[in-house]
């Protein structure tokens, strides 16, 4: 049996949180990928990019997963609101929402944590080498990723409550 | 209204996962806190402890939270199994399980991610300084924390399905 249709209000809140997540993640992505610096090692200068730090690579992967999933879910929600049908809001979709929100929120949380962990401990090691700004941008990107995680975690609570009771 | 009582089988599985989580976390804690090394900087030697790396401090905090929560939940489960009553398995307890498992699984996931992120990027910076073993133990501790997270994430799926339907 199909569950009772979600109210328009709860759909609007979910849509708002998805759009917010998307916004946070896209800004995080831009800051992360455009982040470059010049490391001064004695007389030499070495160009540093986000790719040189493994934690930032993992952050990129987690942001990319988050963006793809959020886009997909936003498209589903908009389609449901426009057509008003429950083709994609049956039990199967609720279970997909549940596991999707859960997994993606873990992915975003670990991405932010890896970014913070690496930045916090590496920044003092390169103090005075002209890369402070580089690591500050790493913090900024990780903070936005964290905000994206918070939105997804709230959505994950909603989708847990919406789970059909079969087990 | 009280939900239908959980079957003995599902309680046994939950208890098994709690004990497993506890085991992973306690070993992770021991490896993390006993981890020391001597860093060779030129002629000088500097003692390195896990406290010197902020990511490892956060790992310690997340393991401590995880252990306290897992102990509490194990005690609740054992008490329920022995007395067979539902004093602590009413709706309120199911909601506590849900949010508890969710929050603690995020805490453990971020702890492991911060540990992995910092270790992966810092290890090559200190190559040849005699602290490889120190970072390898960091990896070991983070891996066990990750296993503890996986168990808690499974428990979190269970407690989401057990949520009372009120929303």
Image: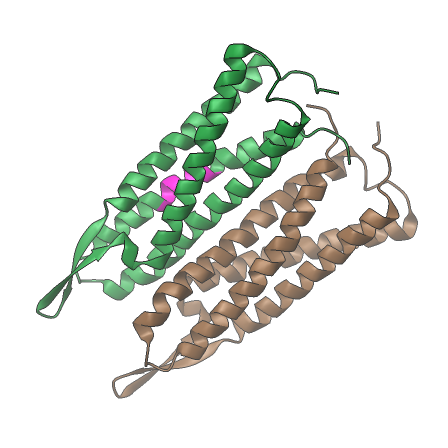
Chain colours: A green, B brown
Is A44 one of the magenta-colored residues? no
- Residue A77 vertical placement versus B131 (above, below): above
| Any part of residue B95 in sight | no
Quadrant (top left, top right, bottom left, bottom right) of the N terminus of chain A: top right
Q: Residue at x 40, y 52 (%)?
A: A58
Nearest the eye: A4 or B70: A4
Q: How many marks?
A: 0
In the shown orientation, is residue A87 left or right of residue A51? right
In the shown orientation, is residue A111 left or right of residue B33? left
Quadrant (top left, top right, bottom left, bottom right) of the C terminus of chain A: top right
Q: Position of residue A87 (x, y in %)?
A: 61, 18
In the shown orientation, is residue B156 left or right of residue B113? right
Q: Residue at x 36, y 47 (%)?
A: A60
- Looking at the image, the residue that sits furthest to the top is A83
- Looking at the image, the residue that sits furthest to the front is A87
Q: Position of residue B6 (x, y in %)?
A: 84, 41
Q: Main secondary structure of the magenta part?
A: helix
Q: Position of residue B88 (x, y in %)?
A: 81, 42
Q: Position of residue A110 (x, y in %)?
A: 47, 50
Q: Residue at x 43, y 45 (%)?
A: A62
Q: Residue at x 66, y 56 (%)?
A: B68
- Residue B158 vertical placement versus B119 (above, below): above
- Residue B43 vertical placement versus B96 (above, below): below
| Any part of residue B115 in sight | yes
The magenta span reads A142-149
The part of the image, by quadrant, that contains residue B94 is top right
- Looking at the image, the residue that sits furthest to the left is A43
Is A148 one of the magenta-colored residues? yes
């Amino acid at each position: 049996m199909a569950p009772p249709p979600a109210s328009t209000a709860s759909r609007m809140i979910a849509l708002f949180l998805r759009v917010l997540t998307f916004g946070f993640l896209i800004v995080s992505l831009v800051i992360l990928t455009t982040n470059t610096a010049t490391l001064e090692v004695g007389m030499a200068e070495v160009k540093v990019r986000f790719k040189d730090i493994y934690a930032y690579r993992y952050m990129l992967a987690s942001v990319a997963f988050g963006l793809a999933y959020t886009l997909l879910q936003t498209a589903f929600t908009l389609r449901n609101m426009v057509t008003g049908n429950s083709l994609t809001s049956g039990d199967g979709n609720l279970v997909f929402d549940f596991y999707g929100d859960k997994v993606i929120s873990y992915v975003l949380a670990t991405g932010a944590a890896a970014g913070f962990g690496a930045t916090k401990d590496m920044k003092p090691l390169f103090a005075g080498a002209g890369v402070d700004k580089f690591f500050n941008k790493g913090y900024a990107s990780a903070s936005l990723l964290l905000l994206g995680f918070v939105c997804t975690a709230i959505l994950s609570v909603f989708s847990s409550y919406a789970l059909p009771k079969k087990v």
